[in-house]
Image (tube, rainbow, N blue to C red):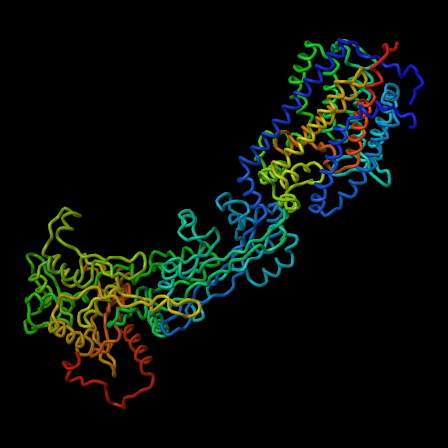
Amino acid sequence: MTMFDRRFLEHFDWWLFLAILLLMAIGFVNLNSGSAATGYPFQWKQLQWYIAGTVLMLSLVVFFDYRLLTVYSVHIYLIMVFMLILVVFIGKTVGGSQRWLSLGFMNIQPSELAKIATVIILSSYFYHDDRPQYGLTDLWRPFLLMLVPIFLIYHQPDLGTALFLVLIFASLVYMARLQWTSFLLLLGTAIATFPVVWEFLKPYQRGRIMDFISPGRDPLGAGYHISQSKIAIGSGQLLGKGYMKGSQAHLNFLPEVHTDFAFSIWAEEWGWVGAVILLGIFFLMLYRGFLIASQSKERFGAFLAFGVTAMLFWQVVINIGMVMGLMPVVGIPLPLVSYGGSSVFTTLIGAGLLLNVGSRRFMFQKGPRPK
Amino acid sequence: MKFKVKTIWRVKRFDKLDQEANKRRCDVAILIMFLFVVTFCARLWHLQIIQGKHFREQSERNRIRSVRLQPPRGKILDRTGRLLAGIKPCFNVCLVREDVGDMEALLAKLSPLLGETEAEIRPRLGSEQKGPQYVPIVIKRGADWETLSRIESRLFSLPGVFIEVTPARKYPYGSIAPHLLGYLGEISREDIEKERYKGARSGDMVGKCGVEERFENDLAGIKGQRRLEVDAGGRLVRVIDEKPPVPGKDLYLSIDLDLQQASEEAMKGYVGALVALDPQTGRILALVSSPAFDPDAFATGINNEEWKALNDPVSRPLQNKALQGRYAPASTFKIVMAAAALQEGIVTKNTSFKCTSQFRLGRSVFRCWNWRGHGQTNLYKALVESCDIYFYQVGLKLGIDKIAKYADAFGLGSKTGIDLPNESKGFIATPDWKLERYQEPWQEGETLITAIGQGFTLVTPLQMACLTAAVANGGTLYSPIYLEKITGPDGHIVKSFESIPKDKLPVSESNLRIIRKALVGAVNDKKATGKQCKMPDVLVAGKTGTAQVVGQAKRRQDDKLDWKYRDHAWFVAYAPAEKPELAVAVLCEHAGHGGSVAAPVARKVFETWFQIQSPLPVLGHGKTAFNRNNIDDHV
């Protein structure tokens, strides 16, 4: 570190870093209220993840060059698949699905880590397989790569995360430029196969989609969660009910206030103003993320930054959309605000990679393109 | 920091075109993201600002459970303050359907605990009719101690079930005057929909008929409310606030418990009605409709058989016959006829007609009840011996219009004005009415039978009691009242009830005196029809009546006659004749002669009354309180 390049600091994205710190601060404050509601001291554990994750993030920025991933992505991919297979055999079952690996001191959720691993392997693939445009025939290999984790995660079962990986894939295919004809073909196929997919869905999964279409269908069934979440958010009104005073959350009308419905308790206690501020911070984070992708001087960095940002973006959209009743109930955590070590690590690793790509773009500013 | 340049570091840089394409893609992504954020802000605005109030209310409703606090229902007491209807706790097994989960499993568990089959319980669960799922419904009212302890001990395995304590009526002297008091029953759906009672909801007990219904708002008190904060599991977090209930007001009736009990006892075995009034004020001292019903039965629920018995078309236990029973007044109507005849100058007290037991009108023959005939009969004798022929003559001379006019003036054919619902008006026939109803002109023969209280005329026992009281008190017709006062729970008088003079009889004092004297004779004379009501110490005045239910021909053999063809027995009386304290009207359906059936009933009532007034015999043996030889002085 003695030979630290000043340009590195100049290009470090302080706005992105600030957004991440703010999100963690909000996450902690919010979890403090959520913990009081659930009776478990989640916030202290989450603080440990934050600290450990931030250290990991900064180490990634400083001691690691993202370009190494062009080679090691394969190893990461294999480790991910291995962990997902482990889950099948020795995974812990919680709430009807087998998602967790117990490491003794902590439980990790490989499907969370699979998100970032997917971004890395796909970025690496598209970096190596550089084409101006992709047709369907060019995509079957990366699709096969994706199919393994998707199948394993779907098997847990965790349809939400499995579909989420498809979204990441789609985002990176967008980045790689898909032929229009292929796009239309894919779209048509998706629409055509929907009834078949519907047949394969589990009853509770169909129920969730039905609840999304008509939330009042069964107020005490699965739609109950969304109804209560909307009541929580709506009852916050302009300025909120006050910190620690959200009755929906604190009297347990709101389910999973520490994870999936963290945004609801925030909106209930801080009102429209608080919710918009939180959205603004997310916007800042994602904007800086896309900017890093946009300013990257080379293909891998651009794909990696775009993939990570898209990953964060879809999580934000799906989670907040769900708690506001704009999307079906899918268990996708809100980055850094929801409780969960695996999610925090995934997000902070992603953020580390973003900062990494951003800080290192000066390395391509001069000189000829290496051959 | 210097990197050794290995192949892996030599990543391909974008050329200019790629760089621009890359930027375009990211710009589009930023735009899409921006649109999402704007959409979300708008959605939040919609939820939190536009619908915010609605959701805030919903969250409050989530959070707050209101528990109603039942006030104790007001007591009903007799005029001396003896408790006729008090309150006792009633334990109900209730259910909140929202909290049940598996209703079938619960039913299977509840059925043996309640000792009832599932099929019996199921209809009580209702459907949407019972209102929203969170409103408790009563599945067993008035559960006994054994059932309660069985359920209480298993409450943890019966989700949604709880035991509620509500006030129910207790009758320390047994059921007293159920027709006047009324009873408590579950509020009807119609009453809820029409919001007849403020704050009432399904399952509440409200007064049905009688005093309980008429003064529901006074008796019920005002419900209190305790607001609780609960969590999603319905567990109590804290009590937010509490508004205590206001107890109901107490009602002091003018009923005298002893007299009422004696009257009910005297009427036992008869289908009919008895009304006893204070003739000076119009206060009802006893009101009996027989047979009675058990007001407790309505509180716990009635099975099909009991319901059938209550609606028996012959004895009609639910009907308040004193107010709603309509009967021909028979010979008691002769009081009205006599007054009309005297007042209209058709007869004096000395005018006499000869009764040969038969009266010819055109081709028809009208008979007197006494087949031997009464011989020369003046007004006194006509009333004492209840001569029909005399009143045929009077009737003919008066004409139907005058008869109707006087009947109306004596309060017949219109409501007495007692403050109870469903009072019957009775009926007074006129030629106009007959023409309209039957398109036939009035016949003179009909005037004759109207004159002896048969025919179309219908009266209620209460009307006859008021009429008797008016004759007794010198001509004031009162609207009967049954309430002395209403007091608050602390005993202060909220409202006291004064007597309501309704009308004055259009009969002069001297004419009334003639009639009163004859009424004394009608009880006390040797040939009096009402002599079974004669009392040794008290001078009773009265008039019998025997209302035919079917025509003369069928009446011949009384003993073999079907019950439903037998005569109604009437007796109206007051005592003491010199200073009336009590006026009584008795009607026994299909029981026979007024003199032999109704008069003894009235006598028992008088006996009880004067026993209450002076419980110790103050008169020496052989002495009477009045001089029978000089009745004029007393009447």
- Which residue ends up furthest to the bottom in the rendered image? B620
Image x and y of residue A247, in percent: 62, 45
- Which residue ends up furthest to the right in the rendered image? B4
Give the number of marks.
0
Nearer to us in this view, A28 or B160 = A28
Nearer to us in this view, A48 or B451 = A48
The reply to whether residue A117 is visible in this rendering is no
Nearer to us in this view, A233 or B478 = A233
Nearer to us in this view, B274 or B505 = B505
The reply to whether residue B255 is visible in this rendering is yes
Image x and y of residue A364, in percent: 83, 15
Residue B440 left/right relative to B225 = left
Quarter of the picture holding the C terminus of chain B:
bottom left
Q: Is residue B358 above or below residue B518?
A: above
Image x and y of residue B101, in percent: 62, 45
Q: Is residue A153 above or below residue B308?
A: above
Quadrant housing residue B113: bottom right
Image x and y of residue B291, in percent: 36, 64
Quadrant housing residue B337: bottom left
Quadrant housing residue A207: top right
x 44%, y 56%: residue:
B305
Q: Is residue A150 above or below residue B419?
A: above
Quarter of the picture holding the N terminus of chain B:
top right
Q: Is residue B545 above or below residue B616?
A: above
